[in-house]
Image (cartoon, helix red, strand yellow):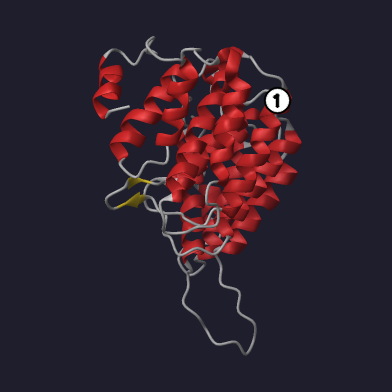
Amino acid sequence: MSESYWQAVMNSGMHVPRDRPLDELTTELVAMLGHPNPRWRDDTAYPLLASWIRDGEYDDLLVGLGDGIARGLRNGLGGDGDESVLRRSFSALVLGEIINRDNNALLLSSRPIMRWGDEATSWLVREQDLRGWVHGRGWAHAIAHGADLFGALARSRHLAQMELTVMLDVIADRLLAPTKYVWRHGEVDRLAYTVIVILQRGKVPLNILEPWIARLGAGVRPARRRGESPSEWPTIEAQNTSNFLRGLYVQLALGVQGLPDLRDDAELFKDPPTNRADLLLAILDQIRAESPWLFTPGSGRRTLPPGP
């Protein structure tokens, strides 16, 4: 359909048009998720699909829609620097909307959620194109959109300790994997917020969380064997990970809030995460170890902020 058709839909309150079948409209919008023009992708396809999902227009079709959207995560996977990332990244964003619809309306069994979780984790660790803003194409933002998808999964009642632990491991794998892309468009904050959601669930014990933080901390310190020539440090992935640890610390220290359109977020974020103080100290230990010449030994333990 023409741009004027979709603009009229946007201007009419974003309601589902009644002049065409919903499946035809959906097929066209899903194809537009990979459009190189951000007016079609960011400003039309995603907001319309998100609005219709939130309004319940797909409630009887949610599993089929989710399976179709999840296939977009595999579109050109392994490519880097081309336009295929747009479909993958915006598929992640829409899949998160579908999962959040279930989080709000309790519509689905665990089976499709787990299937989509497997698709999401497989995609995120294998994604190579980590650009944020692409000149002439707008947002690619695979890491940020992946973080949002993981945030929806982390809220799901169908995920327990094992699945949430896997998500943490995938986030660490993604942070520590070699990359040429500096994350400078809010990616670390959105990833940190996803981790906060996992912590707020209170399902993952401290004896898993502390080694996970230590693994990230080890990734931001240079490891050179005797006799090896020095190389530039930090690497890009080490700097991204360092920024992530600082972002996670700030969010834990200041406290964050839930999303207003999610039914259970007010309750989920009512109190700080379990073991908040221990987690703050564990992160401070890694930040201090990254630059031991800078920080007073043990300084973090004397300056730990009070709870929100």
Quadrant in which the N terminus is drawn? top left
Image: 260 above or below 129:
above
The image position of residue 34, as x and y in percent, is: 42, 41
Q: Is residue 250 visible?
A: no
1 relative to 208 in the view: left or right? left
Count the marks: 1
90 relative to 267 in the view: left or right? left
Q: Residue at x 64, y 25 (%)?
A: 156
- Residue most toward the top? 18
In the image, 33 versus 202, the foreground residue is 33
The image position of residue 224, as x and y in percent, is: 60, 79
The image position of residue 96, as x and y in percent, is: 53, 30
**Image quarter for residue 228?**
bottom right
Q: Is residue 105 visible?
A: yes
Q: Residue at x 53, y 15 (%)?
A: 263
In the image, 267 versus 73, the foreground residue is 73
The image position of residue 95, as x and y in percent, is: 54, 31
SS at mark 1 in the image: loop
Image: 50 above or below 214:
above
- Residue most toward the bottom? 227
Image: 191 above or below 102:
below
Q: Residue at x 63, y 23 (%)?
A: 63
The amino acid marked with disc number 1 is His
248 relative to 16 in the view: left or right? right
The residue singled out by tag 1 in the image is: 158
In the image, 22 versus 213, the foreground residue is 22
In the image, 141 versus 215, the foreground residue is 141
